[in-house]
């Protein structure tokens, strides 16, 4: 990890920046700011042993908020590669990082319970087939497609190393080369409250579904799939027709 120092008033990262590392605060304070319709809102004030930008260790999505220094800060910067290396070879060093993930997960689980209330009645499972739409996807999956029998069904990149594989949970993994279009965990076909959805899993470039962008800096991470055929493209709007990772999802009752 690289030891860094930031002066009061400095911006560690800004909303929309590339998300490629996290910062473990050793001293000082950092405020987390988010732009909204009524102006900028302070989401949190973090201090010693807190982690800033921890999602940069798990996904490639641009920063969702700004981190600005309140008091002079000393912090250790850690990249995704350093994090996975620590999990394998220096587990004691990874404990502080994992602590932040567990606390965030606990908070989000409680929020889901508070918001959703009692579970809805279980409906019949829809039938979904994911078919290849380019030479690249045809080379990686059956030409007549894959019938999806479990949800979520995860699509992403083949990890380039054993350490990178720690972050890759995929049912369908496709090879890609730098500069990557496909994220380690790119999108999933899942079940939502109203049926089948496509969910971006934190990719840098986002996912295009029937011409609508989700993930990255889009307003939402999910989009519903009605009955019929749907185009799914791994890659943001400018890459839609260039991305080799295109699929057709067919949904039937």
Image: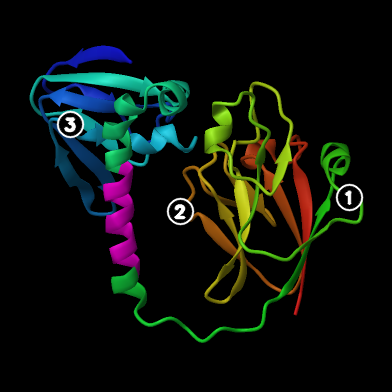
Q: Of callouts 2 and 1, which one flags the residue occurring earlier in the amino acid sequence?
A: 1
Q: Quadrant of the N terminus?
A: top left
Name above or below for residue 133 compared with residue 177: below
The residues bearing labels 3 and 1 have C-alpha atoms spaced at a distance of 48 Å
- In the picture, the disc for residue 41 is none
Name above or below for residue 35 compared with residue 23: below
Mark 2 touching mark 1, by CB under 8 A? no
- Residue nearest the viewer, comparing 143 with 150: 150
Residue at the disc numbered 2: 219
- Residue 12 in percent (x, y) is at 26, 24
- Residue 206 in percent (x, y) is at 57, 43
The residues bearing labels 3 and 2 have C-alpha atoms spaced at a distance of 31 Å
Q: State the image quarter where residue 131 is shown.
A: bottom right
Tell me which residue sits at (39%, 38%) in the image.
55
Specify how the rendered protein is coloured: rainbow
Tell me which residue sits at (42%, 30%) in the image.
19
- Residue nearest the viewer, comparing 166 with 126: 166
Tell me the element at label 2: loop
How packed mark 1 is, by other alpha carbons closer than 10 Å (few <14, some 14-19, many 20 or more), is few
Residue at the disc numbered 1: 142
Name above or below for residue 242 compared with residue 7: below
Mark 3 touching mark 2, by CB under 8 A? no
Query: Is 235 placed left or right of 136 in the picture?
Result: left
Q: Of callouts 3 and 2, which one flags the residue occurring earlier in the amino acid sequence?
A: 3
Q: Quadrant of the C terminus?
A: bottom right
> Bounds of the magenta span?
101-112
Mark whose residue sits in front, 3 or 2: 3
Tell me the element at label 1: loop
Residue at the disc numbered 3: 49
Mark whose residue sits in front, 2 or 1: 1
How packed mark 3 is, by other alpha carbons closer than 10 Å (few <14, some 14-19, many 20 or more), is some
Tell me which residue sits at (29%, 56%) in the image.
106
């Amino acid at each position: 990890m690289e030891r860094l120092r930031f002066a009061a008033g400095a911006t560690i990262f800004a909303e929309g920046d590339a998300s490629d590392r996290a910062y473990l605060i050793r001293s000082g304070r950092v405020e987390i700011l988010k732009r909204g319709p009524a102006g900028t809102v302070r989401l949190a004030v973090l201090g010693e042993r807190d982690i800033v930008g921890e999602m940069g260790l798990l996904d490639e999505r641009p920063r969702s908020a700004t981190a600005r220094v309140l008091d002079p800060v000393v912090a250790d910067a850690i990249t995704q590669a350093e994090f996975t290396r620590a999990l394998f070879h220096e587990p004691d060093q990874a404990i502080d990082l994992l602590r932040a993930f567990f606390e965030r997960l606990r908070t989000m689980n409680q929020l889901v319970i508070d918001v959703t209330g009692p579970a809805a009645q279980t409906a019949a499972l829809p039938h979904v087939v994911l078919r290849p739409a380019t030479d690249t996807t045809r080379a990686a999956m059956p030409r007549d497609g894959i019938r999806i029998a479990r949800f979520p069904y995860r699509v992403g990149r083949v990890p380039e190393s054993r350490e990178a594989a720690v972050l890759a949970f995929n049912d369908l993994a496709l090879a890609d080369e730098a500069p990557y279009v496909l994220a380690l965990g790119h999108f999933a076909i899942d079940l939502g409250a109203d049926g089948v959805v496509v969910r971006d899993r934190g990719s840098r470039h986002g996912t295009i579904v029937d011409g609508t962008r989700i993930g990255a800096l889009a307003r939402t991470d999910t989009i519903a799939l009605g009955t019929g055929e749907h185009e799914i493209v791994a890659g943001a709007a400018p890459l839609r027709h260039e991305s080799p990772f295109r699929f057709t999802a067919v949904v039937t009752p």
